[in-house]
Image (cartoon, coloured by chain):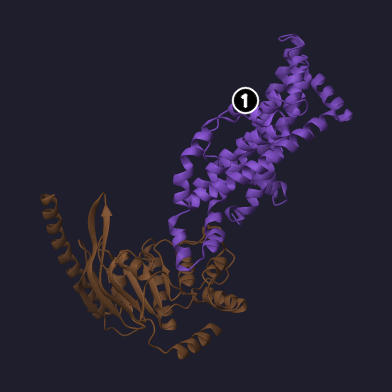
Chain colours: A purple, B brown
Amino acid sequence: MSETILETDLGPARAFAARGWREWSGNGLVSGAIMRAKAAAWLLIVPAIALPVWIIGNERGWLAEQILPRPADVLHTLNEMLASGELAQHAGISLLRVLLGFAVGAGAGLVLGAAMGLSRRVDDHVRPLFTAIAQVPALAWIPLAMLLLGIGETLKIVVIAKAAFVPVAMNTSAGIANVPRALVEVGETFRFTPLQMLRHVVLPGAVPPIFTGLRYGLTHAWIALVSVELLASSEGLGYLLVWGRQMFWLDTVLVAMLVIGVIGFVSDWLLAGVEARLQRWRTDGV
Amino acid sequence: MSIAVDHADRVAETTDSRGRLEVRGVSKTFTVNGAPIAALNDVSLTVAPGEFVALLGPSGCGKSTLLRLIAGLDRDYTGRIVQDGNAVTGTSLERGIVFQEPRLFPWATVRQNIALGLKNAPISEAGKREAVAAHIALVGLDGFAEAYPHQLSGGMAQRAAIARGLVNRPRLLLLDEPFGALDALTRARLQTELQRIWAHEKITMILVTHDVDEAVFLGDRVVVLAPRPGRISRIFDVAAARPRARSDDALIRLRNEVLRTLEHDGADDGKAGQSNRSGA
């Protein structure tokens, strides 16, 4: 679990996500439809290769069915678990944990990141400790956190919050500190108050890195969730993975993985949508 | 046009003598790698209300530094800078500034960019809307109010920046090489526009430039600065009547004279640079 994540060149990925959102929300014209089809085609390349390989592999017996169940079996299990409400229950628990942990962690990350980005003094005082804490992966905090907090919900929320906190704080502080001095000077010539400066110059200028941090934070929240549920839980998608592996129900394992992937994808897409809304000026009329 | 009337009223109640600037014995030292570098040395200059002064000089002569001091963006200097009897202690809505790069907020439309300049202006919301519309018209950007900066050409972006610099109706507009990054044709057009705006607004303008033609074409006076340390080397009066034509013989003669002064300063500078190097 890599924890050192500053804003990297997410450029094309962001542009893709923003475009995807705009077109899905009904702004696309004919060219939009073609673009969308092309994008979908690219997305489907890997499944289009992997799925036949999977099916053929099963038929030819390349791997034992206990190790790699047939796609049809996975689909069957998925349907069964959906119908029984079991899947919804596990997914619901996990989703709630991620949302709570992410809200706490990202909220704290935004506040601390903003303070570090805005104030040299805060940055000088807090940065070394922050870096030290950030370098210890969320997973490595679990043993200590277990002793302090037990294995209840608090543990899960804290571990998930820590995982989300680090990238959000890092990217927020970097984003705010990197708002061009030239634009801040324009605000100075207009006699902006600190609040006006924040509202009209600093925050709009820092939207892209802040959202990079939020998206990383959400991804890391999911990683932490699975880790913490693997170790200490009797419900949730992570638990489903462990239990499925122990019982050699690989179809259950695959269903849990599928659901985690889908939820992660959808939540990232939602965040990308919010970012695109806030950054409409980038794409308007181009 | 309502803005012009409004403006006239305001001028009437505050008398016409505003927009006077005095720079007295200003020196500024930068520290580069621990060594002090004199950027400006004992610069004194008085600018009359409504005057157009061009600060001309090669790069490194401190002309932009001087403008930043006047704007109040840099307060670390010795000497005195006084506008209309008030010492400059920081930025003020009484002084507008246009930078070399338009510096528009990329996330705001032309209208929003100009309106942000009025955030702390003591006028009503309706008055602000009117002022923004009037200044968009003044710089000839009608129809582009809702455009974002990345949709504008360099010249249009700089027009928006000029409108933003003027929207508070400052008594003094500072221009820091505002046309330096534009192509020759656009530059010439905007110089003419600026002359028109200056005549219309009747405010004091100080233009920093390294373009001799621009300085002579626009300035009532051309203040030539020499580098290392930055100081005033010579001041030329430009007597030509307005509106001016670039082809005016008097302007061309003056331009050549200014060029000779610059070359002379440059020769001095070369020698000074050499002796500095050998000394170091």
Indicate the quadrant containing the C terminus of chain A: top left, top right, bottom left or bottom right.
bottom right
Could you say whether the residue bearing mark 1 is in a helix, strand or loop? Answer: helix
Q: Is residue A20 visible?
A: no
Camera-side residue: A286 or B279? B279
Q: Is B198 rendered above or below residue B147?
A: below
Q: Which residue is tagged 1? A: A143
Image quarter of residue A17:
top right
Camera-side residue: A225 or A13? A225
Q: Is A65 rendered above or below residue A207?
A: above
Q: Position of residue A237 (x, y in %)?
A: 75, 28
Q: Is A85 rendered above or below residue A196?
A: above
User: Badge 1: few (under 14), some or many (20 or more) residues near its Cα, within 10 Å?
Assistant: few
Image quarter of residue A199:
bottom right
Chain at numbered mark 1: A
Q: Is residue B31 visible?
A: yes
Q: Position of residue A142 (x, y in %)?
A: 63, 27
Residue type at mark 1: give it: Pro
Image quarter of residue B224:
bottom left
Q: Position of residue B4 (x, y in %)?
A: 51, 85
Direction from residue B96 to residue A106 in the image, left or right:
right
Indicate the quadrant containing the N terminus of chain A: top left, top right, bottom left or bottom right.
top right
Direction from residue A57 to residue B45 in the image, left or right:
left
How many labels were placed on the picture?
A: 1
Give the residue at x 82% y 29%.
A87
Give the residue at x 85% y 29%.
A82
Name, please, the residue furthest toward the right: A84
Q: Position of residue A150 (x, y in %)?
A: 69, 29
Direction from residue B264 to residue B34 in the image, left or right:
right
Name, please, the residue furthest toward the front: A148
Give the residue at x 20% y 62%.
B229
